[in-house]
Image (cartoon, rainbow, N blue to C red):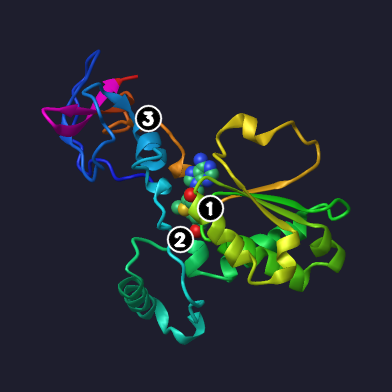
Amino acid sequence: MAPAFSAQVPALRRGALRVRWVTAALFSSGILAGNKPILVRDFVRSALYDPNHGYFSKRAGPVGVLDASIRFNQLEGRSAYIQHLDKLYKKHDIAWFTPVELFKPWYAYTIAASILRTANLSVPLKIYEIGGGSGTCAKCILDYMMLNAPPKVYNDMKYISVEISSSLAEKQLETVGEVQSHLSKFTVEHRDAINRPGWGRTDPHPCWVLMLEVLDNLPHDLVYSPDQVSPWMEVWIEKVKGRKFTSFRSL
Ligand SMILES: C[S@@+](CC[C@H](N)C(=O)[O-])C[C@H]1O[C@@H](n2cnc3c(N)ncnc32)[C@H](O)[C@@H]1O
């Protein structure tokens, strides 16, 4: 979850170099050490992964975990669900829960059912999950396979989690380890998934790659156009007189 950028962007004028200043919101201190403008990809990398101040480098896990599944059959419609969520957020004092948490175990069961329906089961099932958070998806998929797949499929399967946060890697082992038999199928590789050498040599065998709520965490650029006819602009972040701003330049 990348930090929010400016909520309001004014109309832009045409020109070779367009720079329009907008105060940027919710910046962590220390991300922009100098006054040099940086691209959003560098800002995201620093804000999320810097070993000192990065969001995912903090010891306390940022991913909220529900103690128990929500009993959807006991909620009468949308407003009851919203009220229930409100109570959960107050109780847990957490910034956000992800869909795999809120809809557990059903969200992960749906993924598992789809894998089971479409996989070539004559080869051992291999699932990679990038950024597995608290391990809820892994645990629920392994549960589903244990309960619904032919025993050979469950016994031979491998579930590999690639996780950048050491505290979340530990949490995943704990969550999956709630069912002892899952542990022989599950491993956590504590590393940055975008680091190519970490993946080793190409393996020709089929595998599944799951990424839930991760793509926007990866360093990426941001482009902006105020309407459908203006050319795209790239977004830069800069510190001017101690304040941080976003600016826009022609691509
Ligand atoms: C927003 S959480 C989502 C967690 C989980 N997938 C879910 O939906 O509940 C993002 C997860 O991706 C991990 N992550 C972020 N960037 C990563 C990277 N470059 N390599 C591996 N894991 C990463 C975080 O540590 C965290 O576990």
Is 192 left or right of 59, judged from the image as shown? right
Q: Quadrant of residue 232?
A: top left
Q: Nearer the viewer, residue 50 or 42?
A: 50
Q: Is residue 250 magenta?
A: no
Pointer 2 with pointer 1, Cβ within 8 A = yes
Q: In the image, residue 70 lies at what x, y percent?
A: 48, 78
Magenta span: 238-249
Q: Which residue is mark 3?
A: 42
| First along the sequence among labels 2 and 3 | 3
Residue 234 in view, yes or no: no
Q: In the image, residue 154 lies at what x, y percent?
A: 79, 64
| Up-down relation of residue 155 to residue 250 (above or below) | below
Q: Quadrant of residue 243?
A: top left
The kind of residue tagged 3 is Asp
Residue at position x 47%, y 86% in the image? 74
Q: Nearer the viewer, residue 223 or 101?
A: 101
Are there few (<14), some (14-19), or many (20+) residues within 10 Å of tag 3? Answer: some
The kind of residue tagged 1 is Leu
Residue at position x 39%, y 50% in the image? 58
Main SS, magenta residues = strand
Q: CA distance from mark 2 to mark 3?
A: 25 Å
Determine if the C-beta at disc 2 is less than 8 A from ligand 1.
yes
Residue at position x 75%, y 68% in the image? 181
Q: CA distance from mark 3 to mark 1?
A: 22 Å
Residue 212 is labelled as 1
Q: Which residue is mark 2?
A: 98
Q: Secondary structure at mark 1?
A: loop
Determine if the C-beta at disc 1 is less than 8 A from ligand 1.
yes
| First along the sequence among labels 2 and 1 | 2
